Image (cartoon, grey):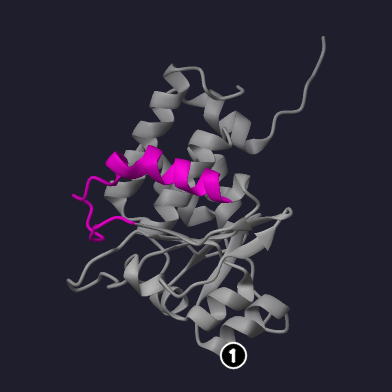
């Protein structure tokens, strides 16, 4: 009888065909983010510039409004793309836009100029917000940034719910991760807390991708 090792995430996925928001809540609750040393270059840079920002996947940063508005910090980090998941002037939103970044320079990468790009979604952090309408648009924008050798900051107000949900959707759609694996991957680098409605929409996306056989298992 042959025996093959299966990772915990694989066992969890195979043991339950139906992905639910409640299941993702449990994964989020039990996936701990390691303590981050302030002695590291990137964290010390964050402290110096009074921003909260973490690289959660190569070339992908999740941060807060302060990181998005600090253009000196963005230049220093080599950020070429910004995705604002909280665009607007209402409470809980971040009032940047294309015009805010008009003075951001292009960056030379791979022997070609990478021009600064911005995209914004006018969302509020509420369980009733339909963030799923932006999943594929966000995934493509993030993927375009990485594909051209750039770096992208995905942010909302505090960098825990709206922005994190967009990055999770990217990992699921473009990197073929299950919702469970995507959450665990990001939680290794940053404390994220998508609201219950967003988690359910990620669970629905997970089921959609499974039905289309877009996962490698």
Q: Which residue is drawn at 40% across and 26% down?
A: 207
x%, y% of residue 142? 50, 48
The image shows a total of numbered marks equal to 1
Give x and y (percent) for residue 7.
Answer: 69, 34
User: As drawn, is 81 to the left or to the right of 45?
Assistant: left
Coordinates of residue 127 in the picture (x, y in percent): 23, 52
Q: In this view, does 139 lie above or below 150?
A: above
Residue 156 is inside the magenta segment: no
Q: Which residue lies furthest to the front in this view?
A: 112
Classify 10 Å Cα crowding around label 1: few (below 14), some (14-19), many (20 and above): few
Q: Residue 202 is drawn in which quadrant?
A: top left
Task: Locate residue 192 relative to residue 217 in the image: left or right.
Answer: left
Give the vertical position of 7 relative to 67 (above or below): above
Name of the residue lying farthest toward the right: 2
Residue 23 figure quarter:
top left
List the single residue furthest toward the bottom. 48
Q: What element carries label 1?
A: helix
Residue at the image position 42 percent from the left and 80 percent from the top = 66
Query: Residue under circle 1?
Result: 48
Q: Which residue is drawn at 28% across and 64% down?
A: 87
- Magenta residues span 120-145
| Residue 144 falls within the magenta-colored stretch | yes
Residue 146, percent across and down? 60, 49
25 in relation to 92, above or below: above
51 left or right of 157 in image: right
For the N terminus, the quadrant is top right
Residue at left offset 34%, top offset 59%? 85
Quarter of the picture containing the C terminus is: top right
Whether residue 10 is visible here, answered yes or no, is yes
Examine the rendering and report whether any part of residue 178 can be seen. no
In the foreground, 9 or 129: 129
């Amino acid at each position: 009888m042959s025996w093959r090792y299966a990772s915990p995430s694989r066992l969890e996925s195979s043991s339950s065909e139906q992905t639910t928001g409640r299941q993702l809540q449990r994964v989020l609750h039990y996936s701990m983010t390691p303590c981050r040393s302030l002695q590291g270059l990137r964290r010390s840079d964050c402290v110096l510039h009074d921003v909260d920002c973490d690289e959660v996947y190569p070339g992908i940063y999740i941060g807060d409004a302060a990181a998005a508005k600090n253009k000196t910090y963005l230049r220093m980090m080599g950020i070429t793309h910004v995705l604002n998941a909280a665009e607007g002037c209402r409470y809980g939103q971040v009032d940047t836009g294309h015009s805010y970044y008009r003075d951001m320079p292009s960056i030379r990468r791979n022997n070609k100029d990478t021009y600064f790009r911005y995209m914004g979604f006018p969302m509020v952090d509420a369980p009733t917000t339909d963030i799923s309408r932006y999943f594929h648009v966000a995934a493509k924008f993030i993927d375009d940034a990485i594909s051209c050798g750039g770096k992208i900051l995905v942010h909302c107000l505090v960098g825990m719910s709206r922005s994190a949900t967009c990055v999770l959707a990217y990992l699921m759609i473009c990197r073929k991760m299950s919702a469970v694996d995507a959450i665990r991957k990001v939680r290794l680098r940053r404390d994220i807390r998508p609201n219950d409605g967003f988690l359910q929409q990620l669970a629905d996306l997970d089921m959609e991708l499974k039905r289309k056989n877009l996962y490698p298992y």
